[in-house]
Image: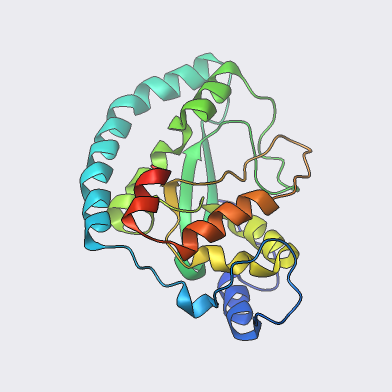
Amino acid sequence: MISSHSDISIQEKILQDRQTYTQEQKVKGPSIDLFYHELNDRSPKMRRLLDLVFGSMTYILYILLNPFILAYLRLSGVSSPYREFNGVGQFGNIIKARIYNIGYYQSVDDDTFSNTTTANHFLSKTNLFKLPLVIHVLKGHISLAGPQVLEDKFALELMNKYTDFHKRFAPKPGLFSPSCYYSYENSHSDYSNELRKDLNYASRQTLKTYLNTL
């Protein structure tokens, strides 16, 4: 497992940002004109029902496909088929997350991934690399739709860069996301566009935005 080496936990950082944030302060990056306490999970009961029903169907798909995906990765020369990390859930709760290794990474100092293969790219383009996360949908840790599950140290890095970043943790993260924070190795990306999509989703947690994201 990859753990955060920061002196402050992601939960503490989110709590601090909730307490200190005001609309008058200078904002770095995109901003949504809502205070954090207004961004509660307003998902209807229908959304939670869809998570359970379609999450169960997706879990069955994962069980059926898992042996073939693992064989495909190994035949393609991928030595580590899984990527495990401490993911950040709603309000900073930590999730022991697992995805298939697609050869990408989130944090700029994470060298877990190396060369990508055809299998890596296939899993990335089809979003099948997220299938192992479906167990967290059934446990209620994440939703089918919502902001991407981020590694804890990467989330802290972006919270220090963007003033409003803590707001994306108001809703539950999702198996399918409006934005993507994965990048190629040695890529120093500007994530302001992804954050803008996440903040728009967080401020409009309706069945329509849920279905649109799916």
Please state which of residues 26 and 65 is positioned toward the viewer in this rendering.
26
Residue 17 coordinates in the image, percent (x, y): 63, 78
Q: Report the residue that reaches farthest toward the top.
A: 75
Residue 168 coordinates in the image, percent (x, y): 54, 62
Q: Is residue 195 left or right of residue 91?
A: right
Please state which of residues 146 and 124 is positioned toward the viewer in this rendering.
146
Q: Quadrant where the C terminus lies?
A: top left
Q: Is residue 50 left or right of residue 100?
A: left
Q: Is residue 188 left or right of residue 193?
A: right
Residue 9 coordinates in the image, percent (x, y): 61, 71
Taking the spot 35% from the left edge, 68% from the top edge, the residue there is 42
Taking the spot 50% from the left edge, 21% from the top edge, the residue there is 73
Residue 79 coordinates in the image, percent (x, y): 58, 26
Q: Is residue 172 left or right of residue 12?
A: left
Please state which of residues 112 and 37 is positioned toward the viewer in this rendering.
37
Q: Residue 70: which quarter of the image?
A: top left
Q: Is residue 117 above or below residue 192?
A: above
Taking the spot 46% from the left edge, 58% from the top edge, the residue there is 95
